[in-house]
Amino acid sequence: MEAGNETMDFDCIPTTEKDSKAAAVLISYASIGSILDDMLVSKESLIADEELANFQLNSKVVSGTIGYRRGSSLSMPVNFTFQHLRMRSGKEKPFCFYWNKTFWSPLGCKTIWYNDTQTVCSCTHLSSFAVLMNLPHTEDPVLTVITYVGLSLSLLCLFLAALTFLLCQAIKGTSTFLHLQLSLCLFLANLFFLIGIKQTQLKIVCSLIARGLHYLYLAAFTWMLLEGLHLFLTVRNLKVANYTSAGQFKKRFMYPFGYGMPAVIVAVSAGSSSQHYGTDHYCWLKVEKGFIWSFIGPVFIICLINLSFYLTTLWILRDRLSSLNKEVSTIQNTRMLTIKALAQLFILGCSWSLGFFMIDSVPKQAQSVIAYIFTIINSLQGVYIFLVHCVLSHQVQEEYKKCFKTIKGTTETDTNVFSTSTSDTGMLEK
């Protein structure tokens, strides 16, 4: 049967064997497709594979029925041939769907053949059908450039920060140790991201990369939690300058908790839903069935706990600053460290919350602005750590000056030796 440019092929024998009279109907709707396509933009009614994250209706909607069998299963499948409303590009793939009252569903229908202009669907029931075409995944080239440039700068800054924390004796202490662990975790996470975020060809490799990123980012937030806990305990015990208890705390607790807790979370997540590591386009966690909360949940809890730690610490320091004059400089330094840690919590932690606003209910223009802010802040986290904890630190500045003077003096000595040797060689030649 034909209706417009669409056809329905079915077997007449099963239709008439029980009914002395039967009718077959095929309806091709001229304009209803545009209405349903507008409804599908929100993606809330779509039930399909992840490949249809971006899609578009690419055929007319047709309805077919045979006798009294509308909506019931058929002993022999019915084939529908759809003409594409626009030419299919090389990367697009057509999917056959039927309209199930409020949403498109692929159940009972499959694509058996297609080319650039047509798609043939085979369905085991009769209803209203159409072809949805998945659109190729596209990226904003500006966001891509910002991501790679920002992460490259962060890698350089995190490397310099880690060297500073390791070699600068003037700032040795528990806080520096915590900064070092945070820098190492972020350095490895950024490196993994740059190298492997798009390695989706092999699912096993992509899954391993996604688990590595999950672990490293969670480890970074865990060390931030330990940093907040250390500041809080130091100020609460009124021993700002005494790091003995902090050193014991580090040896007995920090390493197992800082690297162990993220490992437990990732192990439980991978054991329960290993198939949710790695998407079609990125080696990251899938959003389906709330699996992304295995990352967002711990991050949200850590940010709340750290925020309470930092605000309580600032409140205690405010009281001490007004009552004790002999320790004003020490308390002010600790308060400054707390303010820096609070700013770090916002830069490294709260910036991830912007991802909650990149949803369909938010207007496209607002989503674009949020995406740029999210990308800029998160790709430059390493730059922030290096600037705040190294470049803007007076003690580190003094160490940098000593280092530069030593290097300059060594260079000048080498130059003088070379000049003297050249002069002596000239005298010998004469």
Image (tube, rainbow, N blue to C red):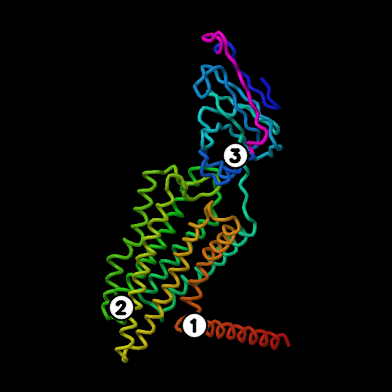
Element assignment for label 1: helix
Q: Which mark is residue 36?
A: 3
Q: Distance between the residues labelled 2 and 1?
A: 26 Å
Dot 2 surroundings within 10 Å: few (below 14), some, or many (20 or more)?
many
**Residue at (57, 18) in percent of width and height:** 66
Q: In this view, does 6 lie above or below 88?
A: above
Of the image marks 2 and 1, the number of the one nearer the N terminus: 2
The amino acid on which the numbered mark 3 sits, given as a three-letter code, is Leu
Q: Where is residue 41 in the image (x, y as percent from the top left)?
A: 58, 45
SS of the residue at dot 3? helix
What kind of element bears circle 2? helix
Name the residue tied to disc 1: 397
Identify whether 338 is placed above or below 13: below
Question: Residue 203: which numbered mark, if any?
Answer: none
Q: Where is residue 117 in the image (x, y as percent from the top left)?
A: 70, 32
Q: Residue at x 32, y 91 (%)?
A: 325
Residue at the image point whose x is 61% and y is 22% from the top: 79
What residue does disc 2 label? 235
Location of residue 58 in the rendering, given as x and y in whole percent from the top left corner: 65, 37
Magenta segment, which residues? 15-33
Q: What residue type is labelled 2?
A: Val
Label located before the other in sequence (3 or 2): 3
